[in-house]
Image: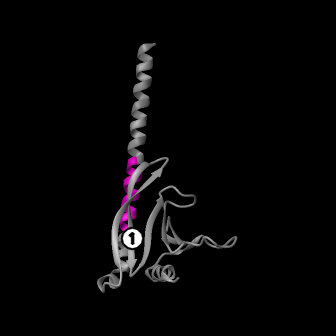
Amino acid sequence: MENELTEFLKQRKEKEEEEKANWNKIKEDWITTLDNFLNKIKLWLSEPAQENLLTIIETKGGLNEEALGHYSAPMLIIRADKDTIKIIPVGRFVLGAKGRVNMLGYGKKKGFLLVDEGWIYFHEKRGYGEPLGEPLTKELFIRLFMEMLKK
């Protein structure tokens, strides 16, 4: 009976280690996806940044998700004069998507979802039967960013 228990515990430990490795891979992929998304945003804002009209600060923030545990994720703080806009990851596991990032500032919030087709701007106030969002392009992001700066 003791050998049976030992074997059972070994198998359980191996399974837990495999699951942990899988979650770590998902977390690493998510952080890479975030890095790529934030790099795209920096590229889209590069012209005004080069003209010193805004400053882009790369930083990290802590996230805690049940499946992934506590981890550090990249985020951006963008300053235009006295105005501050933050691009902050919400999490990898969100309903209906593969991840979410919010743009925050002045009591305003814009949400971006990662779906099979790529990043979309999430329409929080959409009507029944309307699409979840629209593909995030440079033009759309710039428009949303400008809306965030309007008081």
Q: Is residue 55 visible?
A: yes
Taking the view exactly as shown, the residue that stands out farthest to the right is 128
130 relative to 53, above or below? above
Taking the view exactly as shown, the residue that stands out farthest to the left is 50
127 relative to 26, above or below? below
99 relative to 54, above or below? above
In the rendered structure, does residue 25 fall within the stretch colored magenta?
yes
Residue sitting at x 30%, y 86%: 51
Residue sitting at x 41%, y 20%: 6
Percent across and percent down for residue 39 are 35, 71
> What residue type is disc 1 on?
Ile
Q: Label 1, secondary structure: give it.
A: strand
In the rendered structure, does residue 29 fall within the stretch colored magenta?
yes
Between 151 and 122, the one nearer to me in the picture = 151
Give the class, few, some or many, for how many residues have Cα within 10 Å of label 1's Cα (few <14, many ≥20): some
Dot 1 corresponds to which residue? 77
Percent across and percent down for residue 83 are 43, 78
